[in-house]
C-alpha cells in the first residue's frame, strides 16, 4: 500500500480498540519471568556452550602477540578464537568500528578474543588467562583539544535528525551584529551510555552453512544483513530472531560483537554458543552518545523577536564516523530570518559514537533550550512567552513548507496552566523552603517524525482468530500491544483474538524500533496487511468489500451476516502487505512537540539537586495506547533527568577509555530521584503521517527535559551551568554562604 | 572467577585456624563485596570460609552500658534495632544511607567494615593499581579522581574507604573485637583499625592474615543530637562524595567524622574543640593538610558547607 495522500476516514477511526489504554498483552510474560530474552532461550538449540568475550586493555595501538596456551588447556574450554586468527572482518553497513579480526586496536575493550567452554564460569576464567602483549600508540582522546582539526561534516543520524555541514539563510553575521539583545554562549554535553538493563546477548547455532542467531536487536533486517556481510556469507543463510529486547535506546540498533563472536565461536567449537557482553564491556565495546561542544548565538529585537540564530556543534568519532546531529532541531524550532547551522567532526580514538534515544535533538535541545532561557532573561521576558512569540508555523528555512501539525504553543500554554507556572519567581533565587532553593524551568520539546516502510503478514483462522507476523521488535515500548490493537480494530475482533509474533527475520520486514518511528510505521504496515485481508475475506464471502463492515467477529454487508472465521476455511486465509510512503514527508514538515516543565529543589548548602515535579504536555498525533505511550514518555523524562544531573562517561584522556564502565560508576536515576511525573497528550490526529494518523512519542519525551531541569536550577539558584551534567561541584562556589 | 574450595566454619576459632592453614583464604559473610571482586578476579582466593553459621548475629548490652554487635549482624537488622535507633542514631542513619535494602539485608557488620574501595581503576584489571597489584603503579593519579581522597593519601594510592557505617562507628569510638589465627583474641579501637595507604595500599586494616572479626562494641550512649548527612550525585544507591557523621551536644560541643575523603573514616579529635565556633574553623582543622586534585577540590568546600548545614540544623 502506497501512502501518498493524506489519510481520510478509515477503520482505525472507529477507535474501539486503538486509542484505549489497554494493558500490555506481553505484560504477564514479563512479570512472571516467562518472556524469552535472548540469553535465556535454553530450548532453541541443544547442547549450548558458553562464550566469553575478552576486550582490549588499551585505547589505541596493536597487538604484538597473544598467548592462549594456558586458556586452551583450562578446564572445560572448547575453543579459543583470537583476533589474530583471522584478518579484519568486513564492516556492516551501519558499523563505524570494526568488530573483530586483525591486530589493530581502534578503541578500548574492542573484542580481541572469544573463549567457548562448557560453563559460563569456565569461559570467563579462561578468558582471563589469555596473555596479550600490546604496542600502544598515541591516540586522540580529547574532544576539546581536537577542535582545531575538526572538519565541517554533514550527516543524517538515520534516526530522524540531520543537517548539512553548514546551512546559511539570510545573513546571520550582519543581523547578529545589529541585534540589540544578543547571546553568545558555549555549552558542553558529555558522552553518555545507553545503560539498558539487558546486555547485548546472542545464542548462535550453525546447521551446515546456515546460521541462526537468537539475539537482542532493535532492527532485525539490518542486523541480519550486517551479520551476513561481516561474516562474508549470503544473507539468505542467516536467520535472526529477536522477539524480546530488554531495552536498547539505540544501543541495539546495530550488529555488535556479541552476535559476531557467538557465530564465530559456534563455528569454531562446532556447538551452539551463547554469550552476553559483560557489563564492564558495554561502555567501551559498544556504542555511546557522543559528547558535544556547542556554540549558540541568538540575536533579537527588544520586542523579543529573534532576528538571528546560529547553532554550531562539534563532536568526535572514530575514522569514517558521523557527527552528532545536535543542530538539527534549531533548523526548525523557532522563527528568525537569518540563520546558520554547522556541524564539525573531529576524529577521536574513543569507542564508536552512535545513536542514543533522540540522537541529535536530545543533546541539541539540552543546549538550545538553555540558550532560549538565557535570552528570555536578557530580554526580561517570561521564557514561555518568549518561546511562543518566536513560534513558526512553517519551516523557517523553506518558507511556505508547512508543518503537518504544530501545536507547540498549546503545549506550552496548557503546560504552564497545569503546572502553576504563574507561581514561579521571576527573579532567580527568590523561593526558599527550609534547606531547599526551589525553582521552575521550562523547555520546548521537539523531535522529528519519521515514517519508514513496514511490512506485515496477517492470518485468519477458522475460529476467527487473527495472527500477525512481522519482524518488528518490542524493546519494552509496547509494540506487541499496539499491533494487536491495530489488527483487532481492523478485523473487528476483540484483542484476545489476536496473536502477535515479532522479531523473526523470516517474517515480513518491518520498520523496526528506532528514531521513534516504530509505533506509527509498524502499525501502518499491519493496517496495510489487514486491508488486504479484509479484501480477501470479502471476496471469499462474496460480498462487496466497500460495503462490508467488520464488527464483533462478524462480517456484515447489507442483509448478510457471517462469522469472520467462516472466510478462513480450513487452511486459513493469509494476506501480506507493506506500507510505503510517497512524498508527503517532503511536502510537509512532520514533527512532534512538547512543553516540558520541571520543578527542582537545590540544597542551599550542598548543591544537591532533587527534582520535585515534572510535567510533559505532548502533541504527537494520535496516541495509539495512552498507557504504553505514557510509559514511554515518563521513561524518557527519567532519562532526561539523568542527562541533566548525573550521566557522564568519564574519559581518561591519557589512555583513551571511559573509566566508569559499570552501573555503580555510571549513575542513572534511581526511584528516589524521580518524583511525580505528569504526562498530557493533546488531542491530535495527523492524517499526513500515516493511515494510523499517529506519530512517534518514545523520543519526544526526552527532548528538552535536560534543559528544563537546567533552567529550573538557574531559577532556583541564579547559577547558570553550561556544562552537563549539572553536578553539585559546578554550583557549589556560587551558592549563598552557609552560616 | 577462579575455581575455589569452600567450607562452612563451625566456630570463630575454627574459622581462624582454617584461615591460618590457608593464608590466601577469605572469609565470606554476606558476599556482597567479595563475590563481585572475585567475578572480576580482583580477589582470587583459592578457598572460602563461610562464617554465616557461627551464630554471631546477636546484639547484646555490655556491662559498661554499651552494645556488642555480632560480626554477622546484617546491616538491616542493626539499623532497625531499637537501642541503636534510640541511642546511636548516627549509626542507624549511616547504615540506611548505604547501598540498597536488598544489599543491606545481606551485608554484615564485619563485611561492611572490610569492604574495599570503589576507585574505578581498582575495578579495571587492565589498569595498573598498587592496591590490586602492589608495585604496578596508580592509574588514578593524573586520571579521573572526582570520587577519590583529598587527605591522608600517598604517592602510591589516593583511594577512599567507601563505607558509611564505619564513619558513624568512628564518631562513636567503636572497638573491633577479633580472634587471631593463633586463637588469641584482641580489641582494636576503630581509630586504629583502618590504615592510610602509605607505601602499602593493599594493606587496608590492622588485621593480621587470617584474623577474624567476632564483634564490634559501642561504648555507652553519648546523648546529644545525631546526624548522618551523605552528599551524593543521586538520591540513593550511590557512594558518598562527602559524608558527615556528627553528634552534637546542647552546648555546641560534639564529634565529627567524615566519609568520602580519605582511605579511612576521617576524624581529627583535636579539631572538635572548635565545634562551638562553627563549621569553618572546625573543618579547616579537620582537613588541615588536605591535598585534593583538580577534580575533587570541591570536596573541601563541600565538607565545610555540609558541616555548616548540620550545625545549623542542630541549633534548630
Ligand atoms: C551496588 C552496591 C552499592 C553499595 N553501596 C554502599 C553504600 O552506599 N555505602 C556503603 O557503606 N556500602 C555500600 N555497599 C557495600 C556494602 O555495604 C558491602 O558490600 C557490605 O557491607 C559487605 O558486607 P558483606 O557481609 O557482604 O561482606 P563480604 O562481601 O562477605 O566480605 C567483605 C570482606 O570482609 C571479609 N570478612 C567478612 N566477614 C569477616 C569477618 N567476620 N572477619 C574477617 N573478615 C571478614 C571478607 O573476607 C571480605 O574480604 C554497596 C555495595 C554494592 C554491591
Ligand atoms: S588510587 Fe589506589 S585503588 Fe585507585 S588506582 Fe591508585 S592505587 Fe589503585
Image (tube, coloured by chain):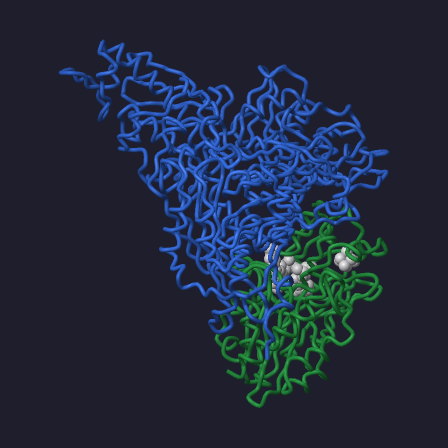
Chain colours: A blue, B green
**Which image quarter has ligand 2?**
bottom right
Compared with A557, A295 (above or below) is below
- Percent across and percent down for residue B302 are 65, 70
Residue A107 appears in the picture as rendered: yes
- Percent across and percent down for residue A530 are 34, 20
> Residue at point 72% right, 68% down?
B262
The quarter of the displayed image where residue A632 is located: top left
What is the count of numbered marks?
A: 0
Compared with A668, A739 (above or below) is below
The N terminus of chain A, quarter of image? top left
- Percent across and percent down for residue B295 are 72, 60
The quarter of the displayed image where residue B272 is located: bottom right
> Residue at point 27% right, 21% down?
A464
Compared with A441, B82 (above or below) is below
Compared with B33, A483 (above or below) is above
Residue B21 appears in the picture as rendered: no
- Percent across and percent down for residue B220 are 58, 84
Nearer to me, A555 or A296:
A296
Nearer to me, B82 or A168:
A168
Amino acid at each position: 500500500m502506497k501512502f501518498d495522500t493524506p489519510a481520510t476516514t478509515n477503520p482505525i477511526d472507529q477507535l474501539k480498540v486503538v486509542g484505549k489504554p489497554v494493558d500490555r498483552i506481553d505484560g504477564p510474560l514479563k512479570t512472571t519471568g516467562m518472556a524469552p530474552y535472548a540469553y535465556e532461550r535454553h530450548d532453541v538449540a541443544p547442547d549450548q556452550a558458553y562464550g566469553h568475550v575478552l576486550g582490549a586493555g588499551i585505547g589505541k595501538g596493536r597487538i604484538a602477540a597473544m598467548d592462549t596456551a594456558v586458556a586452551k588447556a583450562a578446564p572445560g574450554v572448547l575453543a579459543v578464537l583470537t583476533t589474530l586468527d583471522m584478518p579484519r572482518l568486513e564492516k556492516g553497513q551501519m558499523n563505524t568500528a570494526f568488530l573483530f579480526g586483525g591486530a589493530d586496536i581502534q578503541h578500548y575493550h574492542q573484542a580481541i578474543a572469544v573463549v567457548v567452554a562448557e560453563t559460563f564460569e569456565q569461559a570467563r576464567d579462561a578468558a582471563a588467562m589469555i596473555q596479550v602483549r600490546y604496542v600502544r600508540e598515541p591516540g586522540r582522546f580529547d574532544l576539546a583539544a581536537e577542535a582545531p582539526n575538526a572538519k565541517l561534516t554533514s550527516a543524517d543520524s538515520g534516526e530522524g535528525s540531520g543537517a548539512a555541514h553548514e546551512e546559511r539563510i539570510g545573513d546571520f553575521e550582519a543581523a547578529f551584529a545589529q541585534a540589540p539583545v544578543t547571546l553568545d554562549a558555549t555549552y558542553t554535553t558529555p558522552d553518555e551510555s545507553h545503560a539498558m538493563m539487558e546486555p547485548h546477548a546472542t545464542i548462535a547455532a550453525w546447521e551446515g552453512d546456515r546460521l541462526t542467531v537468537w539475539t537482542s536487536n532493535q532492527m532485525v533486517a539490518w542486523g541480519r544483513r550486517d551479520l551476513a556481510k561481516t561474516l562474508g556469507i549470503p544473507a539468505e543463510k542467516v536467520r535472526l530472531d529477536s522477539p524480546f529486547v530488554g531495552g536498547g535506546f539505540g544501543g541495539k540498533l546495530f550488529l555488535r560483537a556479541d552476535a559476531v563472536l557467538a557465530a564465530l565461536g559456534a563455528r569454531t567449537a562446532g556447538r551452539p554458543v551463547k554469550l552476553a557482553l559483560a557489563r564492564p564491556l558495554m561502555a567501551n565495546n559498544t556504542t555511546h552518545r557522543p559528547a558535544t561542544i556547542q556554540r549558540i548565538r541568538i540575536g533579537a529585537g527588544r520586542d523579543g523577536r529573534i532576528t538571528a540564530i546560529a547553532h554550531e556543534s562539534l563532536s568526535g568519532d572514530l575514522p569514517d564516523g558521523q557527527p552528532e546531529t545536535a543542530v538539527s532541531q534549531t533548523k526548525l524550532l523557532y522563527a528568525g530570518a537569518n540563520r546558520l547551522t554547522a556541524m564539525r567532526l573531529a576524529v577521536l580514538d574513543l569507542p564508536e559514537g552512535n545513536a542514543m534515544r533522540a540522537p541529535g535533538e536530545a543533546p541539541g535541545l539540552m543546549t538550545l533550550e538553555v540558550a532560549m532561557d538565557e535570552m528570555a532573561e536578557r530580554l526580561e521576558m517570561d521564557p514561555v512567552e518568549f518561546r511562543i512569540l518566536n513560534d513558526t508555523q512553517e519551516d523557517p528555512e523553506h518558507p511556505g513548507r508547512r508543518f503537518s501539525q504544530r501545536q507547540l504553543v498549546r503545549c506550552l500554554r496548557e503546560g504552564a496552566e497545569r503546572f502553576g507556572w504563574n507561581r514561579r519567581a521571576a527573579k532567580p533565587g527568590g523561593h526558599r523552603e527550609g534547606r531547599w532553593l526551589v525553582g521552575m524551568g521550562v523547555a520546548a520539546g521537539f523531535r522529528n517524525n519519521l515514517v519508514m516502510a513496514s511490512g506485515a503478514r496477517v492470518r485468519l483462522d477458522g475460529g476467527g482468530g487473527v495472527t500477525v507476523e512481522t519482524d518488528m521488535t518490542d524493546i519494552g515500548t509496547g509494540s506487541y500491544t499496539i499491533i494487536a490493537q491495530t489488527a483487532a480494530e481492523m478485523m473487528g475482533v476483540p484483542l484476545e483474538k489476536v496473536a502477535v509474533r515479532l522479531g523473526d527475520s523470516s517474517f515480513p520486514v518491518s520498520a523496526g524500533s528506532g528514531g521513534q518511528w516504530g509505533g506509527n510505521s509498524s502499525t501502518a504496515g499491519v493496517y496495510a496487511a489487514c486491508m488486504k485481508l479484509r479484501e480477501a475475506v470479502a471476496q471469499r464471502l462474496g460480498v462487496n468489500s466497500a460495503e462490508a463492515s467488520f464488527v464483533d467477529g462478524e462480517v456484515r454487508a447489507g442483509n448478510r451476516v457471517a462469522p469472520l472465521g467462516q472466510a478462513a476455511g480450513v487452511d486459513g486465509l493469509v494476506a501480506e502487505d507493506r506500507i510505503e510512503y510517497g512524498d508527503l514527508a517532503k511536502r510537509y514538515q512532520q514533527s512532534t512537540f512538547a512543553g516540558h516543565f520541571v520543578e527542582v529543589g537545590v540544597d542551599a548548602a550542598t548543591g544537591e539537586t532533587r527534582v520535585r515535579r515534572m510535567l510533559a504536555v505532548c502533541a504527537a498525533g494520535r496516541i495509539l495506547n495512552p498507557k504504553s505511550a505514557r510509559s514511554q514518555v515518563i521513561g524518557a523524562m527519567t532519562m532526561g533527568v539523568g542527562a541533566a544531573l548525573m550521566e557522564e562517561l568519564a574519559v581518561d584522556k591519557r589512555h583513551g577509555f571511559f573509566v566508569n564502565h559499570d552501573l555503580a560508576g555510571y549513575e542513572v536515576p534511581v526511584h528516589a530521584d524521580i518524583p511525580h511525573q505528569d504526562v498530557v497528550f493533546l488531542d491530535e490526529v495527523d492524517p499526513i503521517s500515516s493511515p494510523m494518523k499517529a506519530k512517534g512519542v518514545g523520543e519526544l519525551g526526552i527532548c528538552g527535559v535536560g534543559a528544563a531541569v537546567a533552567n529550573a536550577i538557574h531559577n532556583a539558584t541564579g547559577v547558570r551551568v553550561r556544562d552537563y551534567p549539572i553536578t553539585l561541584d559546578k554550583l557549589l562556589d556560587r551558592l549563598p554562604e552557609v552560616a | 572467577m577462579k575455581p575455589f574450595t569452600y567450607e562452612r566454619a563451625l566456630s570463630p576459632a575454627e574459622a581462624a585456624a582454617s584461615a591460618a592453614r590457608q593464608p590466601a583464604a577469605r572469609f565470606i559473610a554476606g558476599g556482597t563485596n567479595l563475590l563481585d571482586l572475585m567475578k572480576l578476579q580482583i580477589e582470587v582466593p583459592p578457598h572460602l570460609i563461610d562464617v554465616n553459621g557461627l551464630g554471631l548475629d546477636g546484639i547484646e548490652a555490655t556491662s559498661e552500658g554499651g552494645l556488642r554487635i555480632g560480626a554477622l549482624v546484617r546491616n538491616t537488622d542493626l539499623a532497625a534495632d531499637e537501642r541503636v535507633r534510640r541511642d546511636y542514631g548516627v549509626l542507624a542513619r549511616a547504615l540506611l544511607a548505604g547501598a540498597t535494602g536488598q544489599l543491606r539485608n545481606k551485608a554484615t557488620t564485619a563485611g561492611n567494615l572490610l569492604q574495599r574501595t570503589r576507585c574505578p581503576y581498582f575495578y579495571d584489571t587492565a589498569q595498573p593499581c598498587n592496591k590490586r597489584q602492589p608495585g604496578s603503579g596508580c592509574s588514578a593519579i593524573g586520571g579521573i579522581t572526582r570520587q577519590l581522597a583529598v587527605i591522608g593519601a600517598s604517592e602510591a594510592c589516593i583511594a577512599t574507604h567507601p563505607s558509611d557505617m564505619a564513619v558513624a562507628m568512628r564518631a562513636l569510638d567503636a572497638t573491633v573485637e577479633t580472634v587471631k589465627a593463633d586463637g588469641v583474641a584482641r580489641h582494636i579501637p576503630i581509630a586504629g583499625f583502618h590504615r592510610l595507604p602509605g607505601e602499602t595500599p593493599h594493606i587496608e586494616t590492622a588485621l593480621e592474615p587470617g584474623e577474624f572479626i567476632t564483634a564490634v562494641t559501642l561504648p555507652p550512649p553519648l546523648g546529644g543530637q545525631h546526624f548522618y548527612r551523605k552528599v551524593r550525585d543521586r538520591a540513593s544507591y550511590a557512594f558518598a562524595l562527602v559524608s558527615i557523621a556528627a553528634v552534637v551536644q546542647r552546648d555546641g560541643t560534639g564529634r565529627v567524622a567524615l566519609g568520602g575523603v580519605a582511605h579511612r573514616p576521617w576524624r581529627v579529635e583535636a579539631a572538635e574543640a572548635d565545634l562551638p565556633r562553627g563549621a569553618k574553623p572546625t573543618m579547616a582543622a579537620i582537613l588541615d593538610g588536605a591535598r585534593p586534585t583538580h577534580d575533587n577540590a570541591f570536596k573541601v568546600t563541600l565538607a565545610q558547607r555540609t558541616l555548616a548545614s548540620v550545625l545549623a540544623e542542630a541549633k534548630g
